Image: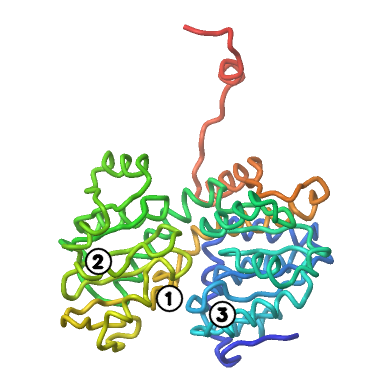
Amino acid sequence: MKYDIKNLGLAKKGKLRIEWANEYMKVLSLIRKDFEKDKPLKGLRIACCLHVTTETANLALTLKAGGAEVSICASNPLSTQDDVAASLVKDLRISTFAVKGEDNRKYYSHINAVLDNRPHITMDDGADLVSTIHKERNGLVGDILGGTEETTTGVIRLRSLEKSGLLKYPIIAVNDADTKHLFDNRYGTGQSTVDGITRSTNILLAGANFVVCGYGWCGRGVAMRARGMGSNVTIVEADPLKALEAVMDGYNVMPVKDACRGADIVVTLTGDISVLRKEHFEVMKNGAIIANSGHFNVEIDIPALERMSKKKRRIREFVDEYTLRSGKRINLLGEGRLVNLAAAEGHPASVMDMSFANQALAAEYVAKNYKKLDKKVYRVPEFIDRNIARLKLESLGVKIDSLTAEQKKYLESWEMGT
């Protein structure tokens, strides 16, 4: 078994943390039991480019239970939990290529390492695996049945690939499942981003001027949590409908340059490039904190910040203090990477339970239906989405009503009115 990790000696700690996460992943545990019995992935090789965390380890265990040969690399250089990577190798016998803090060269060598196993299914978080196949490893396409993608950023990239007519195999957009983006993006990102900010800085959020750039589901979640902690929240948006929604939700809404003037904290969650730029750094106040919780670190123009600065120092473990030529200081968290994973532990296991249930069942769906799928980006089938919601409610001990025959008939009929 091939692997490249930091230290196998960390495996004991990682194993315990994986077991802890599993306690809060009831839906995935139920799917694992079915997979152990039915082996829907038997004989298939699955390459995963995901955040190497305790929750991901439980997904890998589920895929392996389904009969798959699994290999994993990191989808972000700073998101790897090294003890989990060690346990994946030592205890779960899964080929893992991930080291926290790896540079870009090592990052892409790890992506190629999992691709060397000639996967039948790809499982992506940001589409770097798929883009590498399309740019450099075209020879693998003949073996690939399909893939899955978990992030908003990745789905945007893949839809662009589809629109240009270049997508070479079908992809299931796990991010578009309601049981993913309505919960993982909003409640998972909301809580874990605020957690990453507070862990890395130990600042008080009550009374702070907190700017959220992007009012998608992730931005909504962060804004909700920041307001709940007592911050004065301002939203930055380019989409008029989302901006209007933010106004109706009771937030201040203004252009990014205006919002930056009085901000104590600015967080980007847009999926786009250069949201915070030179002109924004120039108007920020002394000591402003900037962070990113979008998938890639391109949302903050870090090269521009470097050029503007006369001094840089690591003032706390996940805080880089940039001193501009004017003497003003700006603090960047987690090197501009996903702050919730770079400086904290990422999403809570109970919300990743639904996201990874979608991943596992989407992989099963690809394995069973790949001959019917075109080279397109597909939503997760509705029956999978609803089944995960039902299982999650059951795991929480929540019961809901069922429609009567009369109610069903009424909803399906056009004849019945007032």
Q: Between tags 2 and 1, which lies in front?
A: 2
Q: What residue type is labelled 3?
A: Val
Residue depicted at x 55% and y 53%: 175
The answer to whether mark 2 and mark 1 are in CB contact below 8 A is: no
- Label for residue 342? 1
- Label for residue 265? 2
Q: In this view, does 258 lie to the left or right of 8?
A: left
Q: In this view, does 40 lie to the left or right of 213?
A: right
Q: Earlier in the sequence, mark 2 or mark 3?
A: 3
**Could you say which quadrant of the image residue 320 lies in?**
bottom left
**Could you say which quadrant of the image residue 64 lies in?**
bottom right
Residue on which the image places disc 3: 84
Query: How far apart are the two marked residues, 2 and 3, measured between alpha carbons?
Result: 31 Å
In the image shown, does 166 or 54 lie closer to the viewer?
Answer: 166
Q: Which amino acid does label 1 sit on?
A: Ala
Q: Which of marks 1 and 3 is nearer the N terminus?
A: 3
* Crowd tier of the residue under label 3, counting other residues whose Cα lies within 10 Å: few below 14, some 14–19, many 20 or above: many
Query: How far apart are the two marked residues, 2 and 1, measured between alpha carbons?
Result: 17 Å
Q: Where is residue 403 in the image (x, y as percent from the top left)?
A: 56, 25
The answer to whether mark 1 and mark 3 are in CB contact below 8 A is: no
In the image shown, does 228 or 151 lie closer to the viewer?
Answer: 151
Q: Where is residue 55 in the image (x, y as percent from the top left)?
A: 55, 68
Q: Position of residue 224 (x, y in %)?
A: 31, 52
- Label for residue 27? none
